[in-house]
Image: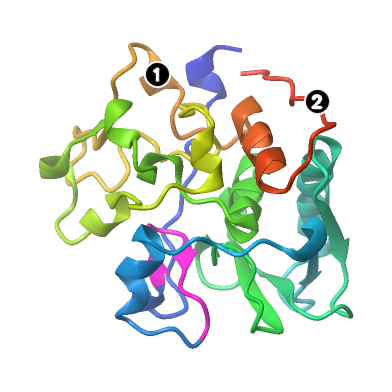
């Protein structure tokens, strides 16, 4: 399969809960946060990690059927296979994720919300149920940001600001603080990277243009975790004995 045909570009805009609670298309502001925290969250805050690398989660029973639950479980098993992070389907141990299928689009908060008993993770619509899309949202919940917002991103991609839909510029804001995941190399193949035409203002525009020749065919994939995604997850949670995921695209 060619790189271009293998890349999934199924994206849906989030239309919940309140528009002002959404950052960078799929990042939810934490519950009880305020409008003035938007910039702080994406520029300077450092996410908290799940204690002992264990993520507890449940499905909202009335929203997620068994077929889609199994897709989520399969995507999480792959993450467990290549890291020491563990996903436990239970709400009995305090803070947990609540996987929902309501509204339209995929979204999660970033990192562990220690003061919240339940934090929502939305997988709403079929586009959210590719393996890579599921892993994208769970990586947000584990403490990953978008790859194209790294502080060093300008060395790897050019943001075409004039091609961005007016008002959507916040989706391309760089982080000011380096996170642990930024210690490893920039990854065009990351499941956390934006596609080249994200938030474009017209049909022919590109908004994210890689500096590396040929990389435009790689960015924005939602097939599966990349090798570097796995390495960053293991670095973040102190996993040192796990093999890299095979790269098949």
Q: Residue at x 45, y 35 (%)?
A: 220
Question: Mark 2 = which residue?
Answer: 243
Is residue 73 positioned above or below 90 on the image? above
* Magenta range: 22-31
Residue that protrudes farthest toward the bottom in the picture: 32
Q: Which scheme is used to colour this image of the protein?
A: rainbow
- Front-lying residue, 204 or 230: 230
Q: Position of residue 153 (x, y in %)?
A: 33, 35
Question: What quarter of the picture does the N terminus occupy?
Answer: top right
**Relative to residue 230, is residue 151 drawn left or right?**
left
- Is 106 included in the stretch rendered in magenta? no
Where residue 213 sits, quadrant-wise, is top left
Is residue 192 positioned above or below 48 on the image? above
Whether residue 74 can be seen here: yes
Please identify, in this view, whether the residue under mark 2 or under mark 1 is nearer the observer.
2
**Relative to residue 109, is residue 167 drawn left or right?**
left
């Amino acid at each position: 399969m060619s790189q271009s045909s293998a890349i999934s570009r199924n994206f849906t805009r989030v239309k919940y809960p309140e528009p002002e609670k959404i950052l960078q298309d799929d990042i939810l502001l934490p519950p009880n946060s305020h409008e003035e925290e938007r910039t702080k969250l994406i520029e300077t805050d450092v996410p908290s990690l799940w204690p002992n690398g264990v993520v507890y989660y449940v499905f909202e029973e009335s929203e997620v059927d068994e077929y889609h639950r199994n897709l989520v479980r399969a995507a999480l098993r792959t993450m467990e296979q290549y890291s020491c992070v563990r996903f436990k389907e239970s709400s009995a141990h305090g803070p947990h994720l609540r996987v929902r299928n309501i509204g339209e689009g995929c979204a999660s908060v970033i990192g562990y919300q220690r003061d919240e008993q339940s934090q929502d993770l939305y997988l709403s619509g079929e586009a959210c149920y590719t393996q890579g899309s599921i892993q994208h949202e769970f990586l947000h919940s584990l403490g990953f940001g978008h790859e194209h917002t790294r502080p060093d991103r300008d060395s790897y991609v050019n943001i075409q600001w004039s091609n961005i839909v007016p008002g959507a510029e916040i989706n391309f804001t760089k982080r000011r603080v380096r996170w642990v995941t930024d210690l490893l190399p920039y990854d065009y193949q990351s499941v956390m990277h934006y596609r080249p035409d994200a938030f474009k203002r017209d049909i022919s525009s590109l908004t994210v243009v890689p500096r590396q020749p040929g990389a435009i065919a790689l960015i924005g994939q939602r097939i599966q975790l990349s090798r570097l995604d796995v390495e960053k997850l293991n670095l973040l949670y102190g996993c040192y004995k796990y093999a890299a995921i095979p790269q098949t695209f």
